[in-house]
Structures are given as C-alpha cells and as structure tokens.
C-alpha cells in the first residue's frame, strides 16, 4: 500500500487478512474482504519509514506478524485504550466510567490477559465488590461496574481482541430499587416555600415538566422560546441522546420570564447562583427538605411527580412520555404512580359513564322483585 505522512509520523499501510489459524497476518492486496492495517513508524524520516515498510512486509511474508487477537493484551492496557476512544469520551457517563475503571475494574482485572478473563472471574468480582468503608456494595452499584466492564469488552470483541464477552454471560440481578415516592400537594407546597430563591425555579421545572437534573442545570437561554412556550433540548442535552421539545406550563413560563429580566450577560445559563451557573445545590435541597418536614425524598423523585401529574391531568401516554423523555412504556409505568384516590376517582368516572350509557340495572332488579 505504501507510506502515508501525517503531522506526527509516517505510517506504513498494507492490505491484509488473517491466516487460517488466526494467529498471523497475510498480505492480501486486491483480495476481496481484505482490511487495511496501519503501523506507526514514529518519526518523520522518509528513509527510516521505507526501511520500516520493508521490515514489516518481510515479517508478514514470513508469517511473523501477529494478529491483534494473537497478541496478549492486558486488561489495564485495553482499559486505557478504551477510555481514550472518542466514542467513549462523548458518553454522558464518561467520568463515572473513568472512576469505575480506575478504582474498581483495573485493580481487580488489570493484570489479567484480556482473552483469559472468564465468566467465573466476573462472578468473583461481583462477590468481592465492597464500598470504601469495607461493607458490601449495593446490587445497583455492582451492576453499574458490570455495565462498564461489559461495554468495554464488547468494544474489544468488535475489534477482534476477544472472541466472546465473558461479562455478557454473567446475569445482573434486579436491584429492586424502583422508587414510588411522590409528593402530596401539601408536601410540594411546603418544599417549594422552604427552598431558597435560587432553588425554587429548579424545583418547579423538575416538578412540573419532569426534566432531569442535568437538563435543568445545563439549560441555556438559546434553548428557551418563551414566545412559543417551549424548551428545546438537543440530542447532546439529553440522557437518551434524543432531542425533544418540552412545552412549558404557565407557572414555568412566568418563572422564566422573571429570570429573563434578571438575565446575566456574563453567561448563557438560565439558572444561576451569585451570578455563576448553578451546579451543586445538594446542600440547599437537603435544607429545604428538612425545613419543609419532607422525608424519604430525592431530587430525582420529582420526575415521578411530573409523570404522575401528567397522567392524572389526562395527558395521553405518548405525549407524556415525550415531555419527560421516557423512551419505553416500561419506564413510563415505573415513574407513573397510582394512589388509592386515583382508583376511587376512576370508579366514580366509570359509574357516571355507565349511568349515562347503560340501562339502570339496579332499579330494574328492584322492580323485578
């Protein structure tokens, strides 16, 4: 194939296929299905690059150039390559993956050859995973580690470094962590009133529109259309990587209009604290919960409130899912909670409907007696 010069180095390229035993490369210029393989010379000297090209070609002809699959790759080496990949760096969970790799997976799997990791090793990891204080980690925490490991090894499979993914052959148990905490109208009123002024608008968007925390704190004014009444989220703004339009309620519109009047020219962000983009309000949120006397509640539970309120308001499932950003009916059902009062109201509505559309059965029965 020849040489290619790039700013950092010369590169040697050949068209190759794997040998019959899968352990070495075979020159295959013009052969259908052959792939282009590139070697980095490491310098910008063309003479050295020509010598490297000849040496690599000789190794291939002699069957001495191993395939990637034949080369022993340690997990810690692959982990570094994996975390350096652009497709991984763009994931919203990238920083979590870096931490899980560095603090958990590499210390356990780091010295193992990638191809020698077995399902039993994954099971052993799950069994020994502990918190920093030495107690056993929760099932959800262990599952999070497992998901990162599984994805990293899936990428290795796609790159022909592994034949199969051992982490995919180990089941992840259901953490049984579904929450059903929804604020009553009284609790919501107390929480909102107890919140600091900079926190109130954030709580309102989460409670009425069901936006995720990251969607709220990263919201910029170019995403807000007060005239049309929409917040437009781009694919890079959402957890699901799918864009969506969120219609704003009258309360939210009024709040955003007030914030627009005080808008800072120093930043595009909508929600600020002391002139800076709002990032961490955990302390303020905990204080508001305490002052309001609301217990057993998390910020993410506000999405449950929004989903439940949309259903009670009679919004159809498809539209409601679009507003809060759910991609599956199963997730919608998980976030949508039915109280005893809802069931009673449903029976009342059904009774009124039957009275208007069917014969009066009970009166008929009384007359027949």
Image (cartoon, rainbow, N blue to C red):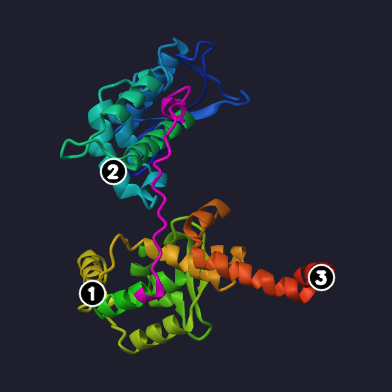
Q: Are marks 1 and 3 in contact (CB under 8 Å)?
A: no
Label whose residue precedes the other's in the sequence (3 or 2): 2
Quarter of the picture holding the C terminus: bottom right
Q: Kindly state the secondary structure of the residue where label 1 is placed.
A: strand
Label whose residue precedes the other's in the sequence (1 or 3): 1
| Residue 75 location (% of width, % of height) | 31, 27
| Residue 55 location (% of width, % of height) | 37, 18
In depth, the one of 352 and 256 nearer the eye is: 352
Mark-to-mark CA distance, 2 and 1: 27 Å
**Residue 323: numbered disc:** none
Q: Which residue shows up at 23% across the image and 35% down it?
A: 130
**Residue 122 falls left or right of residue 364:** left
| Residue 231 location (% of width, % of height) | 47, 74
Q: Are marks 3 and 2 in contact (CB under 8 Å)?
A: no
**Residue 79 falls left or right of residue 53:** left
Q: Which residue shows up at 26% across the image and 81% down it?
A: 197
Q: Are marks 2 and 1 in contact (CB under 8 Å)?
A: no
Say if the magenta span includes residue 215: no
Residue placed furthest toward the right? 368
Residue placed furthest toward the left? 133
223 above or below 128? below
Q: Kindly state the secondary structure of the residue where label 3 is placed.
A: helix
Say if the magenta span includes residue 164: yes
Q: Nearer the viewer, mark 1 or mark 3?
A: 3
Q: Nearer the viewer, mark 3 or mark 2?
A: 3
Which residue is disc 1 drawn over? Answer: 276
Mark-to-mark CA distance, 3 and 2: 72 Å
What segment is highlighted magenta in the picture?
Answer: 159-186
Q: Kindly state the secondary structure of the residue where label 2 is placed.
A: helix
Which residue is disc 3 drawn over? Answer: 364
Q: Which residue shows up at 34% across the image and 73% down it?
A: 187
Which residue is disc 2 drawn over? Answer: 98
């Amino acid at each position: 194939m020849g040489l290619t010069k790039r700013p950092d180095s010369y590169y040697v390229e050949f068209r190759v296929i794997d040998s019959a035993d899968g352990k070495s490369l075979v020159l295959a210029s013009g052969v259908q299905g052959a792939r282009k393989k590139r070697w980095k010379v490491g310098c910008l000297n063309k003479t050295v690059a020509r010598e490297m090209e000849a040496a690599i070609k000789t190794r291939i002809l002699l069957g001495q150039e191993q395939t990637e699959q034949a080369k022993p790759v340690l997990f810690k080496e692959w982990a570094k390559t994996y975390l350096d990949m652009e497709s991984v760096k763009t994931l919203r969970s990238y920083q979590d993956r870096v931490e899980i790799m560095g603090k958990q997976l590499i210390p356990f799997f780091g010295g193992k050859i990638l191809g020698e990791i077995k399902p039993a090793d994954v099971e052993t990891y799950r069994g020994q995973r502990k918190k920093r204080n030495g107690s056993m980690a929760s099932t959800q925490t262990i599952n999070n580690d497992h998901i990162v490991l599984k994805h990293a090894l899936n990428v290795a499979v796609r790159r022909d470094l592994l034949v199969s993914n051992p982490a995919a052959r180990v089941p992840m148990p259901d953490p049984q962590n579904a929450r059903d905490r929804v604020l009553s109208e009284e609790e919501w009123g107390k929480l909102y009133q107890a919140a600091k002024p900079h926190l109130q608008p954030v709580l309102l968007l989460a409670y009425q529109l069901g936006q995720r925390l990251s969607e709220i704190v990263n919201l910029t004014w170019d995403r807000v259309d007060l005239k049309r009444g929409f917040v437009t989220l781009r694919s890079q703004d959402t957890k699901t990587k799918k864009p969506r339009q969120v219609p704003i309620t009258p309360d939210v519109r009024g709040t955003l209009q007030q914030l627009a009047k005080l808008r800072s020219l120093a930043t595009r962000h909508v929600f600020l604290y002391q002139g800076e983009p709002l990032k961490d309000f955990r302390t303020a949120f905990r204080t508001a919960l305490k002052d309001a006397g609301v217990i057993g509640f998390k910020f993410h539970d506000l999405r449950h409130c929004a989903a439940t309120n949309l259903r009670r308001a009679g919004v159809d499932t498809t539209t409601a899912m679009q507003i809060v950003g759910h991609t599956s009916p199963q997730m919608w059902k998980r976030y949508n909670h039915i109280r005893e009062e809802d069931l009673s109201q449903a029976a009342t509505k059904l009774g009124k409907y039957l009275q208007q559309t069917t014969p009066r059965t009970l009166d008929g029965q009384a007359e027949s007696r």
